[in-house]
Image (cartoon, rainbow, N blue to C red):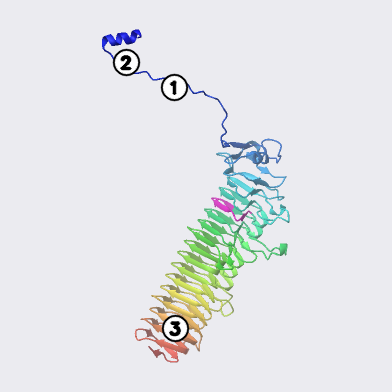
Amino acid sequence: MSFTRWLSHRLGLSLRPTKARPARRTFRPRLEYLEDRCVPSTLHVARADDSLTEGGTLRWAVARAQSGDTIDFIGDAGRNGVTLTQGELILTQQNLTIEAATGQPPVTISGDNLSRIFEVAGGASVTLSDLAITGGNGVANPTDNPQYGAGGGVLVDGGASLNVTDCSFTGNTAPFGGAIDLFEGTLTVSNSTLSGNSAFDGGAIYNFYGNATLSDSTLSGNAAVDSGGFNADPAGFGGGLDNEGNVAVQISGTTFSGNSAFNDGGAIFNGGFGTNGLLGKVTLDNGTDLSDNSAFSGGGVANFGMTLTVNDSTVDHNSANTGGGLYNGGTLTVSASRLSSNSATQYGGGVFNSRILTISDSTLTDNTAGGPAGTFGGGGAVANFFGMLTVNGSTLSGNSAGFSGGGIFNFLGTAIVAATSLSDSTGYVGGGIMNYLGTLTVSDGCTLTGNAAFVGGGVYNYFGTTTISDSVLSHNSASSTTNAGGGLYNFGGTATVEDSSQIIDNSAPGGALGADVLNHGTLYQDLSSIIGILDGNPAVPI
C-alpha cells in the first residue's frame, strides 16, 4: 500500500479513481489545395500608344486584366487619350470596368477609322464609364465572320453584357450599328450621348434579338444610310436605333433628335415579324422625346411586327412620306403623350396605322399630311388604313390634310373615337374625320367643333358606316356652294345619329345644301338626338 493510500485510509478519505491518459495523437503536416482566387485590382494606362508588349498601354492592360479588375487612365493617356493602331480590343473578363480616373474628364479612345474599338465576347460583362469612343470602324472584321461589319464602336456578342454610363460615342461607322451592335446580348446605356454615328442599319445602335435599356441619354444626328447594294442589304433603317427580332427594349427619359433614315424609322425602327405573329416589345416612357427626326416612313418611329408602347413621351417636328411622327404596322399604344407639328407628305402626319393602334389621354396638335388643300394626302393627326384604331380621352386640334381627314382619315378600317375633342382641323373632304369605306363610331361625349372642309366640315362618310352617339358636332363649316354638309356629309353610306347627339350650328355658304347635315345615303336618327338643317334624303326614325 502506498503512503498516500495509507494516509487516506487513516484519515477516512476516499480517492477518486484515476483515468488512464489517452495516447497523444500524431500531427502530420500536409498541403491542402484551395480554389483559385484573385483580388480585384486597378491597372493604370499611362501611355497613349498601342503597344502590346510595353507596359502602361491600354492593349497591355486589357491583355493582363482579370475578372473584377478596373482599368483607368493617367498621365499622357489620361490627358490625350488613346488611339488604336493594331485593331480592336477583345474583352473576355467578367465585371471588368474601363473608366477615366476618379475626378478626371472623359478619356478619348479612337479607332482612327481603321477598326472597331471594343468587342465584348460571349459570357463577358463590361462597364464603360467616362469615355469618349470615336473613330470606330466596324468594317475591319473578316468577311466570313457572321457578324461582319457589326458595331463601329463596340460589338456585344451573344451572352455578353455591356453597361455604358457617362460616355459619348461620336463619329463611329459600320454597316450595322455605327456606335454599338448588340448581338443577342444585354446593353444598358445611361447618362450618355451617341451622336454623328452612321450605319446602313442602326445609325447609332443595332439590336439583334437583344435586351436593351436606355435612360437619360441623347441620340442625335445619327444616320441610317443607303447601302448602295452592300451585301444585298436594302438598308437605311433606324437612324438612331434599329431593333430586329424578339427584343426587349426599355427607353426612359431619353432624347432622339435630328436622326435620319434612308428608309424607315428616323429615330427608331422595329422589325419583329415572326412565323407565329408579333415579336419583340419596345417601351418609351418617362419623358422620352423624339424631335426633328426624318425618314421615308415613320419619321420618329417605324414599328413593324412589334408591340410598341409610347407613354408620357413627346413626338414633335418629325417628318416622313408616311407617318410623320409614328408609323405602326404592329401593335401600338400611345398614352399620356403629345404628338405635335409632325408632317407627312402623304398620309398620317402624326400617326399612320395599318394594324392595331390605341391612343388615350394624349394630345395631337398641328400635325399635317399632304400638300395644299384640295391636292393629296390624308389624316393630319391619324391615318388608319385597314387597321383597328381606338382614340379615347384625347385632344386633336389644329391638324390639317391636303385632301382627306384633317383630324382622322379612316380608310377601309375600323375607328372608335370616344370622349375626345376634335377641333380646328382642316381638310378638303372631312375637316374633322373622313371615313372612306370603313366603320366609324364617335361616342361617349365627343365634341367636333371649329373644323372646316370643302365638303363635310365635321365628318365626311363616303360609302362607309358611321355612328354618332352621345356626341356633339357644332360650329364646323363647309365651303362648297352646292353640296356642303357643314357638320356631316353622308355620301352613299349609312349614318346613325343617336343617344342625345346634336348636329347643330354648323355652317355652309348661302344656297348650299346641308348646313348641318347633307344626306346622300341612309341616315338613321333616334328621338333623343337633334339635327339642325338637314338636306338630301330624310332621316329614318329609330
Disc with the residue nearer the chain's start (2 vs 3):
2
Q: Position of residue 476 (x, y in %)?
A: 45, 79
Work out how far the residue at label 2 is from the one at label 3, CA to CA, in angstroms: 127 Å
Q: Position of residue 443 (x, y in %)?
A: 41, 77
Tell me the residue that label 1 is attached to.
Answer: 22
Disc with the residue nearer the chain's start (2 vs 1):
2
Judging from the image, what secondary structure is the residue with disc 1 in? loop
Tell me the residue that label 3 is attached to.
Answer: 507
Determine crowd level at label 1: few under 14, some 14-19, many 20+ residues with C-alpha closer than 10 A.
few
Q: How many marks?
A: 3
Q: Do the CB atoms of the residues marked 2 and 1 lie less than 8 Å apart? A: no
Q: Amino acid at mark 3?
A: Ser
Q: Amino acid at mark 2?
A: Leu
In this orientation, does residue 272 appear? yes
The residue stretch that appears in magenta: 179-193
Tell me the residue that label 2 is attached to.
Answer: 15
Is residue 186 shown left or right of residue 174?
left
